[in-house]
């Protein structure tokens, strides 16, 4: 893998972000190109087809499928209400009468002469999508949604759960290696995005839910705490749709993990500002990572220089992402081109990295990611 | 000689092929040298579907660039691959397979769950799909629950079957009505109708078209079960393939560019591997099981009784889906393969971290053992799934039609699995964890533990994870594909002899004795106790005819206690004797189990001695 490297997570105080905001079915677009939008601005709306109710009319009315239509009191397209008698049949010279009653409000969509089923369609429900970030509409996706451009600070996490939220950032950790405890949370955190250091603790998650905290962010989370919070285990990393009171985002991984210094430093400068957050994560084709966006943030001076990723070269800042150095930070010092044998006896391309403490270690290139600015 | 599916109309002496997997993109260079096609070199790089690349050809270029460096030959230019070859630059043809688009996701529906719905499921799986759900009239759910389910899932396409030709139309039309009411939407893109393939009672076609035609993109093919006793999967599978190419593979970012690099269609990875496994079975006249354990899925292919089956366990893999193995198997079943104790929380966190950083590799022996433990469970779970679907046709009458069925398949009726581990002619493993195991014997043991072969079975692995590329190569040059498969791809691990039976009351007593003559002329006379594993050197190409005498209650193929004479061949791992019994049961007690694992790993020389000693003494 001589030319390969794992791109790192983006952490920058200034980025131009384009967010697609679209609905999964054909929608009306409510804004136009050039409009300024806020996170809560509804940009597209549609009606979600109501749920269908299928009734086996032939069975209920004791008729052959081909006889159902003539026994119906309604026809396709008619409106019906809950409790309406929509079909009638009688047998034994009219002594036994059978009724077909509508179980819902809606419309008669289909009467089948082959199966004897009828389909009622419940009224549609409205479906909307909001802008999610403050910014400008730069593109209309016909019948689907829009693209909103935002300029500001951007921090990607490695994993999250829970949907989109919007609130003020409250940094509650004194250092990147300090866990976020329940005692760090108070009434001031209600409706906020609370940032800790190394770990979102189980006790903090519990208290956050009670206080109405919108989101918690830290370096790591203990797997069992996450399972307890969700009430189920996660099999495949496709998240964001969980029905949870507080969105969670971790920046480094599972277990207590010191938050990367540059991420923590950026949170310090963003403390108190309004931000958009989502925990949505998808680690497959069309990868999505959780993120925090502080739209409109203008750094007084760029204290974190934007970097153009050149791949792995001596001097590149990296994060080690596998045991035995998981979570450690360092810089590349050497990239030997030939394959080398590691403890497992595998032949792999390696690099030598100088860790923050000065120690020089050898790791497979696949086990590092570039710290992106 | 087998005719190619695509005739390129020119001589092909050099071939470059890539497989864009969900995690890694692998490239191989094949050349004709001294009238024989051989693998020259390979390269690999992470698949680039994530930002900032979002282009599969970036990963392909990285993998090919590695080949350029290793051969000193220019293969790439600004437009893509240099073809045809000009002197020392380029190749005669470039081919590719891909599973980077996230796989084909299908929902299937049929009338009777164990009959037409199951045939539909087999057709979808055989075409390389992940089956999200199977809807049937008798699937135990209420109508509104089925409709809700269809609405929730967003498949790439649907397959509807039901009824025999000329039979009742009512039930299949009712299922069509249910689908029409749900109005399912495609996973990708809101502006096109969801494709649905109808492969049911042909007499009901017009009624199904009336029901679904306006709402969905309806395609009609031949009935999967034209009569109860026959299953016709080919036309449905072909249509699934066609739609897959049009709609799904195109979703991988940069796929449009990849398509332009190659003169033949980019083939879905599982379809390519499947066709290769089937070809091996047919050409050699043997029963075969093949497995491809990837980052996202584990695909199993089998060829028994002239029937090819494929299943995909959609969420059993070793990177993206690793946590689903944890979820389905449970931590205890994974930990039982570790010869050391480990904090539960630590183990869970490590598995999660592999999920969120899927391209990393084990650096320490401890990490390698954890990954191989998870692989054993993924293989076992996927194989249980496969056996449940690789069955004879259900619902076949036991009268005259039963006789016809017996004639066709030579099988017992109904739901019996086609898989017979005692009659397995070859077990082939592929996928990163098997092909890249630092010692081949590790791959052999993972296959033995995951599949539990019975009696006398040859084992092999895909040397460098190149079966997908050889599968697509077979479509343009079957001869080159077969030559490279035989000479460079198939690593013959050796044979395993594993008697079937339970723990004897007397404990670790001898359960089997093998007698024969080694190629050098010396006598081979070895006993094996219950719970023991042994490994003997027997080089590739060496043959050993042995008389295998199991003790009372143990079976190696001729029945309990009955001797078998077999000719076994050598391989890189030699001959492995497995006395742990079948079904395989590890000791319940953790300490005893760890001791046994250490004994087995040492008997087979699985791991480097010093780091292993440090690890277990820690």
Image (spheres, helix red, strand yellow):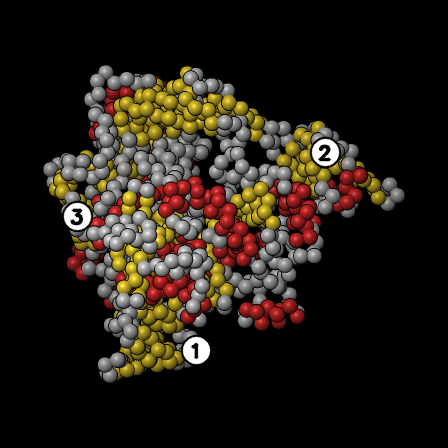
In the picture as drawn, the residue positioned furthest to the left comes out as A358
- Circle 3 packing at 10 Å, graded few (<14), some (14-19), many (20+), is few
A139 vs B574, nearest the viewer: A139
Eyeballing the image, is A43 above or below B159? Answer: above
State how far apart marks 2 and 3 are (Cα): 72 Å
Q: Residue at x 44, y 61 (%)?
A: B4
The N terminus of chain B - image quarter: bottom left
Eyeballing the image, is B234 above or below A139? Answer: below
List the residue tagged with mark 1: B558
B226 vs B397, nearest the viewer: B226
Q: Residue at x 69, y 46 (%)?
A: B207
Q: Sequence-wise, which precedes: disc 2 or disc 3?
A: 2
Element carrying mark 1: loop
B506 vs B266, nearest the viewer: B266
Q: What label does residue B270 carry, if any?
A: none
Residue B533 visible in the current orientation:
no
The image quarter containing residue A294 is top left
List the residue tagged with mark 2: A76
Badge 2 and badge 1 in a common chain: no
Eyeballing the image, is B122 above or below B280? Answer: above
The residue mark sitting in front, 2 or 1, is 2
- Circle 2 packing at 10 Å, graded few (<14), some (14-19), many (20+), is some
Q: Residue at x 47, y 49 (%)?
A: B130
State how far apart marks 2 and 1 are (Cα): 67 Å
List the residue tagged with mark 3: A337
């Amino acid at each position: 893998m001589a030319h390969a490297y794992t791109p790192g997570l983006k952490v920058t105080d200034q980025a131009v972000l384009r967010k697609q905001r679209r609905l999964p079915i054909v929608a009306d677009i409510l804004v136009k190109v050039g409009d300024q939008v806020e996170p809560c601005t509804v940009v597209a709306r549609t009606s979600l087809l109501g749920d269908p109710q299928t009734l086996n009319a032939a069975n209920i009315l004791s008729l052959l499928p081909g006889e159902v239509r003539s026994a119906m009191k309604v026809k396709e397209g008619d409106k019906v209400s809950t409790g309406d008698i929509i079909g009638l049949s009688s047998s034994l010279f009219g002594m036994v009468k059978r009724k077909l009653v509508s179980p819902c409000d809606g419309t008669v969509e289909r009467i089948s002469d082959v199966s004897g089923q009828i389909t009622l369609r419940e009224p549609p429900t409205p479906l909307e999508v909001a802008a999610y970030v403050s910014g400008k509409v730069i593109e209309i996706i016909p019948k689907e949604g829009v693209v909103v451009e935002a300029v500001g600070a951007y921090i990607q996490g490695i994993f999250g759960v829970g949907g989109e939220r919007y609130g003020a950032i409250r940094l509650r950790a004194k250092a990147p290696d300090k866990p976020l405890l329940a005692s760090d949370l108070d009434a001031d955190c209600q409706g906020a995005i609370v940032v800790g250091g190394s770990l979102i603790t189980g006790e903090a998650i519990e208290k956050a839910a009670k206080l109405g905290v919108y989101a918690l962010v830290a370096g790591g989370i203990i797997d069992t705490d996450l399972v307890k919070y969700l009430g189920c285990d996660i099999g495949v990393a496709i998240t964001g749709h969980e029905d949870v009171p507080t969105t969670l985002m971790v920046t480094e991984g599972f277990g207590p993990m010191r938050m990367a210094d540059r991420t923590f430093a950026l949170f310090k400068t963003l403390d108190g500002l309004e931000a958009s957050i989502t925990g949505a994560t998808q680690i497959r084709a069309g990868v999505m990572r959780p993120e925090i966006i502080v739209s409109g943030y203008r750094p007084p001076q760029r204290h974190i220089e934007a970097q153009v990723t050149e791949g792995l070269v001596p001097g590149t800042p990296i994060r080690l992402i596998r045991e035995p150095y998981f979570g450690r930070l360092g810089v590349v010092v050497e990239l030997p081109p030939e394959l080398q044998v590691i403890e497992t006896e595998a032949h792999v391309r390696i690099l030598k990295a100088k860790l923050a403490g000065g120690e020089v270690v050898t790791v497979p290139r696949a086990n590092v990611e570039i710290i992106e600015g | 000689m087998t005719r190619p599916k695509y005739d390129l109309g020119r001589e092909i002496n050099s071939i470059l092929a890539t497989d864009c997997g969900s995690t890694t993109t692998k490239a191989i260079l094949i050349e004709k040298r001294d009238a024989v096609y051989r693998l020259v070199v390979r390269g690999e790089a992470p698949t680039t579907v994530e930002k900032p690349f979002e282009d599969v050809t970036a990963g392909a270029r990285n993998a090919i660039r590695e080949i350029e460096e290793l051969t000193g030959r220019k293969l790439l230019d600004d437009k893509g691959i240099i073809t045809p070859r000009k002197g020392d630059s380029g190749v005669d043809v470039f081919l590719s397979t891909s599973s980077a688009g996230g796989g084909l996701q299908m929902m299937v529906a049929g009338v009777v769950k164990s009959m037409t719905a199951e045939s539909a499921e087999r057709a979808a799986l055989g075409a390389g799909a992940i089956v999200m759900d199977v809807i049937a009239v008798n699937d135990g759910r209420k109508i509104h629950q089925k409709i809700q389910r269809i609405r929730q899932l967003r498949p790439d396409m649907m397959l509807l079957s039901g009824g025999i030709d000329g039979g009742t139309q009512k039930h299949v039309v009712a299922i069509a009505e249910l689908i029409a009411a749900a109005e399912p939407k495609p996973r990708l893109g809101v502006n096109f109708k969801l494709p649905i393939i109808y492969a049911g009672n042909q007499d009901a076609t017009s009624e199904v078209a009336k029901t679904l035609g306006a709402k969905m993109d309806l395609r009609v093919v031949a009935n999967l079960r034209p009569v109860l006793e026959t299953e016709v999967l080919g036309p449905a599978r072909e249509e699934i393939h066609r739609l897959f190419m049009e709609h799904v593979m195109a979703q991988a970012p940069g796929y449009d560019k990849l398509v332009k690099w190659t003169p033949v269609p980019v083939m879905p990875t599982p379809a390519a591997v499947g066709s290769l496994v089937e070809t091996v079975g047919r050409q050699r006249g043997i029963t075969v099981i093949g497995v491809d354990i990837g980052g996202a899925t584990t695909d199993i292919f089998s060829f028994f009784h002239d029937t090819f089956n494929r299943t995909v366990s959609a969420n059993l893999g070793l990177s993206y889906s690793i946590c689903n193995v944890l979820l389905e198997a449970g931590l205890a079943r994974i930990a039982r393969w570790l010869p050391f104790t480990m904090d539960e929380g630590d183990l869970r966190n490590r598995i999660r971290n592999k999920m969120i950083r899927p391209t990393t590799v084990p650096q320490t022996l401890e990490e390698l053992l954890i990954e191989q433990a998870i692989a054993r469970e993924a293989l076992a779970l996927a194989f249980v799934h496969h056996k449940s679907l690789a069955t004879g046709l259900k619902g076949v009458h036991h009268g005259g039609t039963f006789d016809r069925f017996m004639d066709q398949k030579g099988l017992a009726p109904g739901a019996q699995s086609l898989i017979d581990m005692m009659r397995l002619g070859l077990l082939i493993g592929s996928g990163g964890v098997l092909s890249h195991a630092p010692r081949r014997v590790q791959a052999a043991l993972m296959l033995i533990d995951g599949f539990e072969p019975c009696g006398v079975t040859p084992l092999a692995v895909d040397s460098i994870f190149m079966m997908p590329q050889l599968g697509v190569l077979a479509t343009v040059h079957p001869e080159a594909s077969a030559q490279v498969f035989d000479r460079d791809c198939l690593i013959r691990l050796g044979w395993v002899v594993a008697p079937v039976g339970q723990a004897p009351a007397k404990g670790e007593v001898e359960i089997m004795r093998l007698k024969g003559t080694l190629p050098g002329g010396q006598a081979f006379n070895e006993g094996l106790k219950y719970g023991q594993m042994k490994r003997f050197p027997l080089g590739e190409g060496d043959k050993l005819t042995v008389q295998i005498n199991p003790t009372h209650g143990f079976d190696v193929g001729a029945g309990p206690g009955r001797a078998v004479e077999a000719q076994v061949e050598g391989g890189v791992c030699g001959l492995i004797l497995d006395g742990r019994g079948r079904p395989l049961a590890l000791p319940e007690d953790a300490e005893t189990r760890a001791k046994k694992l250490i004994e087995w790993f040492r008997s087979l020389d699985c791991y480097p001695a010093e780091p292993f000693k440090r690890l277990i003494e820690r």
